[in-house]
Amino acid sequence: MFKQSFTNLSKLPKQRVRQWLSTFETIICDADGVLWHFNKAIEGAPETFNLLKASGRRMFVVTNNSGVESSALIKKARSFGIELDDNHMLTSAMAIAHYLGSKKFSKKAYIIGEPGINHELSKFDICSFAVQNEQSDKSMLQFAKEMKLDPEVGAVIVAKDDTFNVQTIMRACAYLLNNRVLFLGTCLDGAYPIGNNRVLVGAGAMIAAIKTISGRKPLILGKPNPMMVNELRNCGHINPETTLMIGDTLKTDILFAHNSGFQSLFVGTGVSTVKDVEAARCSGTQQGMAMVPDTYLPSLVQLQEFV
C-alpha cells in the first residue's frame, strides 16, 4: 500500500492506518533504537509491543547484537516489561551458528567479537576461540613473523569487538590468506551514536579493515541478509506478504525488510534520521531506494492508537 513512500502514518486518517495494520500477521522489531537504548527502555515501546502481541500477532525481535546469547537478550527484554516468547529473539550470532551448522562445519572458528558468538556456536558443537586484548611491544614485522596460527581454523568471524587492534587485523588476515577459510561477519553497522557527539565503533568498521587488507569479501549473515529469518520462513511462521519490519536503521533494518519482501516502518528513535531517508530517496539509485521505508512514525509508542 505504501511501498517506499516514507508515509508519515500520524498524518493519515486513523481508520486507514488501522486497516493497513490489520493486514499483518507477524511483526518483527529491531531491539536497540526501537525497543530500548542500551540499558533503558524507550518510552512506551514495551507497552506497544505487548499491545500488538495481545492483538494476536506473532511478535519477534531480530537484532544484529552478537554480544550475548539470545537467552540473555530475552531476559533483558523481559526486564523492561516486554512480553517476548521463548525462541522469538533472533540474533546475528544465531544466524552465523545456523549457517555453519547447515554446512556441517567441523573445523575451528576464530572469532573477533563478544561472547555471544561462542555461545551460539557451542550449541552446534562448533569449536571456536578468540584472542582478545592481544598486545605487543614488537614491531609489526616481528609480530607477523612470530605469530602462531592454528592450522585447524576454517572460519574467521568478525563482530563488534572492544579490544580490536592492529594485532587482531594481522591475525585475521593471516588466516584469510587461505581461500578455503570462510570470512563471515555479523553486520555492517559502522558506528553507533551515543549522544554528545560521541560514537561507538561498530562491526562494519572492523570488517572493512580486514576486508581491505585481506582482499577478501565477507559474507554478512546479520541484517540486511534475509537468511536471518530462513528458519521462521521455512517453519511457516513468516509470510512475507503479511509481515511488518519495524526498525531505526536504513542500512540494516529497512534494507532487510526490502530484501525479505516485508513491509517496513521506520521509527526515529535510533541511528538513522529523516534526513538520511531523504538522501536515500534523492540518490536516484536502486540501492538508495531499497533503503527508503514504506512508512514512518517518530517513535513506536505512536503505533498504539492504531492497534
Image: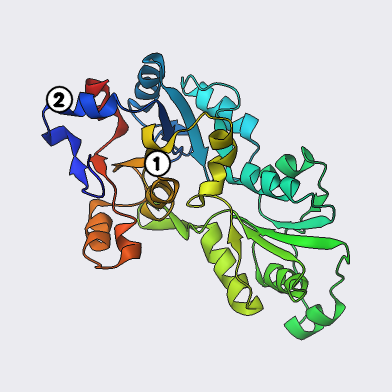
Marking on residue 33? 1
Say which quarter of the image contains residue 290: bottom left
Q: Residues within 10 Å of mark 1 (few under 14, many from 20)?
A: many
Depth check, front residue: 292 or 150:
292
**Left-right relation of 212 to 126:** left
Q: Position of residue 57 (x, y in %)?
A: 41, 21
Of the residues tagged 1 and 2, which is closer to the observer? 2
Residue bearing mark 2: 14
Q: CA distance from mark 1 to mark 2?
A: 25 Å
* Percent coordinates x, y for residue 292 in the rendering: 29, 53
- What residue type is disc 2 on? Lys
Residue 74 horizontal/vertical position (percent): 57, 28
Task: Indicate whether 23 appears above or below 263.
Answer: above
Depth check, front residue: 273 or 228: 228
Q: How is the structure coloured here? A: rainbow
Residue 55 image offset from top left, x and y in percent: 36, 15
- Look at 44% across and 46% down and name the residue there: 260
Q: Is residue 86 left or right of residue 136?
A: left
Q: Are discs 1 and 2 less than 8 Å apart at CB? A: no
Q: Is residue 60 above or below residue 115?
A: above
**Residue at 23% across / 23% down in the picture?**
306
